[in-house]
Amino acid sequence: MVVIGVERVPGSPATAMLAPETDGQLESVGGAMITLTDANRDRVCSAVERPGTPKPPLPVLKKGAEWLKPEMRVWPRYLKGGGKLRQATVSGLIL
């Protein structure tokens, strides 16, 4: 899945806003908490600190998130069903 944004709430793990890419099109499926090892978490943080995009790459997404260019890919772990992510965490980076 592609990381399209990050939402930060003080006192909680950051949440990656994710979208699968099918035939070059993105569709938002929700967020996954970023609970990675230190090295991978640092890679995600450095990507977030790079200039992103002022507008979300998809319409009707969470307000207050930091939007990124859809370049970083991750493996999420989540409960299946409903087409949206449920109780999701980012389990790895695809380099």
Image (tube, rainbow, N blue to C red):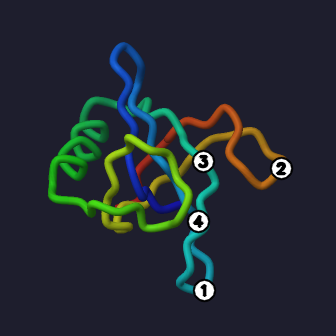
Q: Are marks 4 and 2 in contact (CB under 8 Å)?
A: no
Question: What type is the residue that disc 3 sits on?
Answer: Gly
For image coordinates 36% across by 61% down, the residue present is 72
Q: Are marks 2 and 1 in contact (CB under 8 Å)?
A: no
Per the image, label 4 sits on a secondary structure element best described as: loop
Q: Residue furthest bottom?
A: 23
Question: What type is the residue that disc 1 sits on?
Answer: Asp
Task: Write down the quadrant of residue 12 in the picture.
Answer: top left
Which is more N-terminal, label 3 or label 1?
1
Point out residue 67 in the picture as x, y percentages from the top left corner. 34, 55
User: Label 2 crowding class (10 Å Cα cut-off): few <14, some 14-19, many 20+?
Assistant: few
Point out residue 24 in the picture as x, y percentages from the top left corner. 53, 84
Asked if 12 appears above or below 8 in the picture, the reply is: above
Check residue 82 in the rendering and tell me which mark sits there, or answer none. 2
For image coordinates 24% across by 48% down, the residue present is 48
User: Label 3 crowding class (10 Å Cα cut-off): few <14, some 14-19, many 20+?
Assistant: some
Per the image, label 1 sits on a secondary structure element best described as: loop
Which is more N-terminal, label 3 or label 4?
4
Give the CA distance from mark 3 to mark 2: 12 Å
Residue named by callout 1 = 23
Question: What type is the residue that disc 4 sits on?
Answer: Pro
Residue named by callout 4 = 20
Q: Residue furthest top?
A: 11
Which tag is nearer the camera, tag 4 or tag 3? 3
